[in-house]
Amino acid sequence: MSDDLVLAIDQCTSSTKCLLVDPAGMVVREENEPVPIRYPPPGCAEQDAGEILDSVLTTATRCLNGVPRSAVRGDRNQHPARVGDRPGPPRPAGPTWCWPAGQRT
């Protein structure tokens, strides 16, 4: 296993995916964790920000299991959602609103 790995995190509407990628672009490990979507009123969708955070931590932990910290040179994550927080330990201020695939206008 290379000593120059990148942890790539894709947090999308239905799940969080993590890849551990080597310098040649080859996927060394891959993990996936579903994230529930709730549909409170018709036409609306929301997710629990704590469940999103848990899915990121779970997939990243599984992907990095047994990998020396010195082997990972960076991480990448891109997601348009921003979740408010309060001072102190991470605690989401509320649910995130989302647009399931095919429902964006």
Image: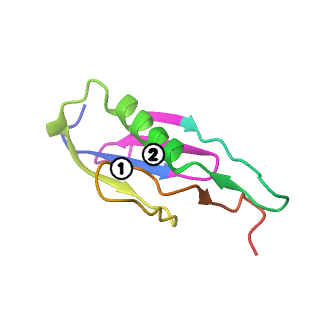
What colouring does the structure picture have? rainbow
103 vs 2, nearest the viewer = 103
Spatial CA span between label 2 and label 1 = 9 Å
Disc 2 marks a residue whose amino acid type is: Leu
The residue at which mark 1 appears reads as 90
Is residue 28 something that shows in the picture? no
Reply yes or no: does residue 22 show up in magenta.
yes
Question: How many residues crowd around disc 2 within 10 Å: few (fewer than 14), some, or many (20 or more)?
Answer: some
- Of circles 2 and 1, which is in front? 1
The numbered dot on residue 8 is: none
- Looking at the magenta stretch, what is its main secondary structure? strand
Residue 71: image quadrant is: top left
Reply yes or no: does residue 81 show up in magenta.
no
The numbered dot on residue 53 is: 2
Q: Is residue 71 left or right of residue 52?
A: left
Q: Is residue 49 left or right of residue 85?
A: right
Is residue 95 something that shows in the picture? yes
21 vs 46, nearest the viewer = 46
Disc 1 marks a residue whose amino acid type is: Pro
Which residues, given as a range, are shown in magenta?
Answer: 11-32
48 vs 9, nearest the viewer = 48
> Residue at position x 35%, y 56% from top?
76
Residue 47 rendering spot, x and y as whole percentages: 62, 51
Marks 2,1: beta carbons within 8 A: yes
